Image (cartoon, helix red, strand yellow):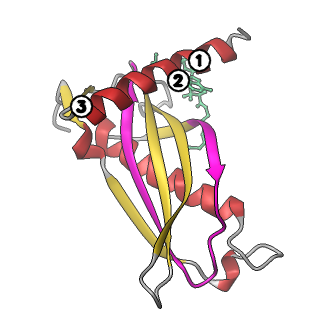
C-alpha cells in the first residue's frame, strides 16, 4: 500500500450518491422511511471519510439530523457528503440531502446531518488520517465550526 499523504484537500473527499426511492423504501404514510434516509446518509458519509482516510472508517456518531421535508416515493434522492474537519483519527462529514421530482426536475433540500467516523487499522484500532487542506473561505469557516462541534461532542461524552 502506498504511504498516506500528509494533507488532502476537502475536494478529494466530496462524494455524491443518488438513488431512486422505490415503494419498498416507504413508511406507513407512504413517504420515504427516516431509517432508510439515515442508512444512505451513513453510506455517503463513510464513502467521503474513506476517500480522505485512504482506508476503512467506522461510524462513531450521527448528530444534528434534520428532517425538514419528506421525500416522496418516486423522487430521486441525492446525498452530497464532504469532510469538514479531521482530528487525529476522527473525521466529521457533513451530508446534505436533496429530493428531485423527476417529472418536473424540481429539487428540494430535505435533510442535513453530521457524521463522525474514525479511521481504523486491520485490528479495528484508531489510526491517524491526513490533515485537511481547506482551499476556500467557506471550507475554512466549516472547518472551524467542525472543530467546535468536535470539542462539544468530546465534552458530552465526558458528561460535561
Ligand atoms: C469508534 C471506535 C473505533 C473508537 O475507538 P476508541 O478505542 O474508543 O477510540 P479512542 O477513545 O482512542 O478515540 C479515537 C478517536 O475517536 C473519537 N471518538 C471515539 N468515540 C467517539 C464517539 N462516540 N463520537 C465521536 N468521536 C468519537 C475520539 O475523539 C478520537 O478522536 P481523535 O483521534 O481525532 O482525537 C470504537 O468505539 C468502535 O469501534 N465503535 C464501534 C463502531 C461501529 O461498529 N460502527 C458501526 C459500523 S461502521
Q: For residue 12, which numbered disc appears in the image?
A: none
What residue is at 20 percent from the left and 38 percent from the top? 1
Chief SS of the magenta region: strand
- Tell me: 75 left or right of 156: left
* First along the sequence among labels 2 and 3: 3
- Residue shown at 71% from the left, 75% from the top: 31
Placement of the C terminus among the 4 image quadrants: top right
Q: CA distance from mark 2 to mark 1?
A: 5 Å
In the image, 148: left or right of 128?
Answer: right
Query: Badge 1: how crowded within 10 Å, few (<14), some, or many (20+)?
Result: few
Which residue is labeled 2 in the image? 149
Give the label, 2 or 3, closer to the camera.
3
Q: Secondary structure at mark 1?
A: helix
Q: Residue at x 63, y 12 (%)?
A: 155
Q: Earlier in the sequence, mark 1 or mark 3?
A: 3
Magenta segment: 60-87
- Which image quarter: residue 89? top left
User: Residue 140 location in percent, x, y?
Assistant: 28, 27
Numbered disc total: 3
Q: Which residue is mark 1?
A: 152
Amino acid at each position: 500500500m502506498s504511504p498516506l499523504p500528509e494533507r488532502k484537500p476537502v475536494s478529494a473527499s466530496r462524494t455524491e450518491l443518488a438513488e431512486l426511492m422505490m415503494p419498498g423504501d416507504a413508511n406507513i404514510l407512504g413517504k420515504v422511511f427516516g431509517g432508510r434516509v439515515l442508512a444512505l446518509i451513513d453510506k455517503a458519509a463513510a464513502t467521503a471519510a474513506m476517500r480522505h482516510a485512504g482506508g476503512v472508517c467506522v461510524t462513531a456518531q450521527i448528530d444534528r439530523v434534520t428532517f425538514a421535508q419528506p421525500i416522496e416515493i418516486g423522487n430521486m434522492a441525492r446525498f452530497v457528503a464532504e469532510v469538514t474537519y479531521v482530528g487525529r483519527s476522527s473525521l466529521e462529514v457533513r451530508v446534505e440531502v436533496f429530493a428531485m421530482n423527476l417529472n418536473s426536475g424540481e429539487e428540494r433540500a430535505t435533510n442535513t446531518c453530521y457524521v463522525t467516523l474514525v479511521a481504523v487499522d486491520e485490528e479495528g484500532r484508531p489510526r491517524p488520517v491526513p490533515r485537511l487542506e481547506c482551499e476556500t473561505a467557506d471550507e475554512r469557516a466549516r472547518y472551524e465550526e467542525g472543530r467546535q462541534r468536535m470539542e462539544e461532542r468530546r465534552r458530552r461524552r465526558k458528561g460535561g
